[in-house]
Amino acid sequence: MPHYTAIVTLLAVLFYFFVATRIAAARGRFGVKLPATAGNPDFERVFRVQMNMLEWMPIFLVPLWLCAVYLNDIGAAVLGLVWIGGRVWYYIGYSKAVEKRLPGFAIQATVCVLLFVCAVTGIVLHWR
């Protein structure tokens, strides 16, 4: 049973919850009323952080779990922690300026590629 990956999954969901709550705070800080999602560039960057993370969650979670089940729980969990670190870096950078999002984005995208490769490798090794 992939216990470490389960913990990392909960940490990723917890961080997503945190990022989602930043939208409500940003609405108040920048005066963006519901249902608007545009109008203030500072708000739009915070909004895009949350939306981008939502877009990447399935790309991250599916290979994370396939890697954990078919190859290695600890390896998947470590890569998952690096992914969360990349998302934190993305959040901090993008909240300040558009250009500052790229290092965090590169880290999390690279982790997703590695998890995909690990998942495929694990599945192939177990193919019978």
Image (cartoon, rainbow, N blue to C red):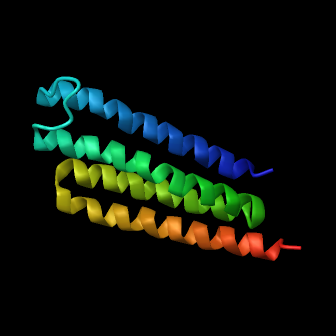
Camera-nearest residue between 16 and 56? 56
Furthest residue toward right: 128
Q: Would you say 88 lies left or right of 77 here?
A: left
Residue 90 picture location, percent across and down: 33, 55
Q: Quadrant of residue 50?
A: top left
Residue in the image at 74% along x and 71% along y: 122
Residue 128 picture location, percent across and down: 89, 73
Residue in the image at 28% along x and 27% along y: 24
How many numbered marks does the figure carry?
A: 0
Above or below, 124 against 93 in this view is: below
Residue 10 picture location, percent across and down: 59, 40
Above or below, 109 against 55 in this view is: below
Q: Would you say 123 lies left or right of 78 here?
A: right
Residue in the image at 61% along x and 60% along y: 63
Q: Would you say 49 lies left or right of 113 here?
A: left
Camera-nearest residue between 81 and 70? 70
Above or below, 114 against 43 in this view is: below
Residue 14 picture location, percent across and down: 50, 37
Q: Quadrant of residue 41?
A: top left
Residue in the image at 65% along x and 71% along y: 118
